[in-house]
Image (cartoon, helix red, strand yellow):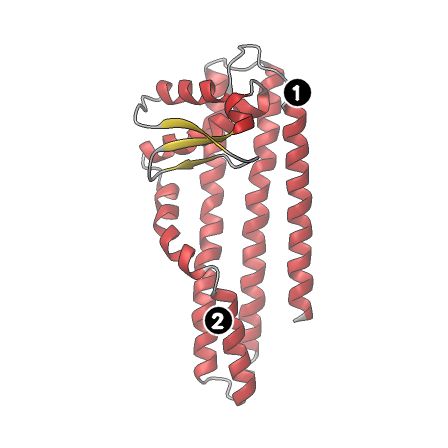
Amino acid sequence: MMTYYILIGGIALISWLVSRRLKSKFKTYSKIHLRNGMSGAEIAQKMLDDHGIHDVKVISTAGMLTDHYNPKNKTVNLSEAVYAQRNAAAAAVAAHEVGHAVQHAQAYEWLTMRSKLVPVVSVTSGMSTWIVFGGIALMAATGVAGGLGFYIAVAGLVMMAFATLFSFITLPVEYDASNRALAWLKQKNMVSQQEYAGAEDALKWAARTYLVAALGALASLLYWAFQVFGGRD
């Protein structure tokens, strides 16, 4: 278990460092005011209009970095700072979230795959580690490597695998949304060269948070798989 705690601790540290860097980047680029004077909400609405999407609403949501697109009620939810602010960071985030709305409207395959996994992952992700651990404990208590405990542990690994798959499917979804956002900002001449550079850098660091999460999920899955199947030797 000590190895597991070290692994989780290392991943948590990297995640914290990336998150801290992301917040620092957004703070920096929040000081670069847009020459066009548009707010994040206005940027989002214009991008929706330019893509012919008229059934999605842009709304404000509480919190910091709580921005997201909700495909169920078709809303682009922008944090209070992004919704009202008129800077490079706000433009980047607003355009990125609309990028998800565009993906939804165009039935982007990776987004569709992720959406199908949401019900499964929402149920299994919270319990998978406990089920694996319980199965291993039962294997140790009974001294039977291939008995009920093993199958319980494998069931937990399957659940964990779905969460890991979800994390990796999220990567192309997030990178594609950023690419759509940056392409639109550039093509429509919405930002200056300096503003574009800030938006690009901010979205790059945002994407890295998802990359760290995916690698962390994979590392955890491999660790527990080794414990389960190694315990049979």
What amino acid is found at the position of numbered circle 2 in the picture?
Ile
First in sequence, mark 2 or 1: give its number: 1
Image quarter (top left, top right, bottom left or bottom right) of the C terminus: bottom right
Element marked by disc 1: loop
Q: Is residue 197 left or right of residue 49?
A: right
Pinpoint residue 213: horizontal percent, then vertical percent.
Answer: 56, 50
Q: Is residue 210 left or right of residue 50?
A: right
Q: Which mark is residue 131?
A: 2
Mark 1 Cα within 10 Å, few/some/many (few <14, many 20+)? few
Q: Which mark is residue 31?
A: 1
Q: Who's the residue at 51% across and 76% down the image?
A: 134
Q: What is the residue that sits farthest to the front in this orientation? A: 62
In the rendered image, the vertical position of residue 136 relative to residue 43, given as above or below: below
Pinpoint residue 156: horizontal percent, then vertical percent.
Answer: 46, 69
What amino acid is found at the position of numbered circle 1 in the picture?
Lys
Pinpoint residue 71: horizontal percent, then vertical percent.
Answer: 35, 38
Count of marks placed on residues: 2
Q: Is residue 48 left or right of residue 203?
A: left
Image quarter (top left, top right, bottom left or bottom right) of the N terminus: bottom right
In the rendered image, the vertical position of residue 150 relative to residue 179, given as above or below: below
Q: Which mark is residue 73?
A: none
Quarter of image, res 231: bottom right
Element marked by disc 2: helix
Q: Who's the residue at 38% across and 42% down the image?
A: 111
Depth check: 13 or 227 in front?
13
Disc 2/disc 1 C-alpha distance (Å):
47 Å
Q: What is the residue that sits farthest to the top in this orientation? A: 36
Pinpoint residue 38: horizontal percent, then vertical percent.
Answer: 51, 14
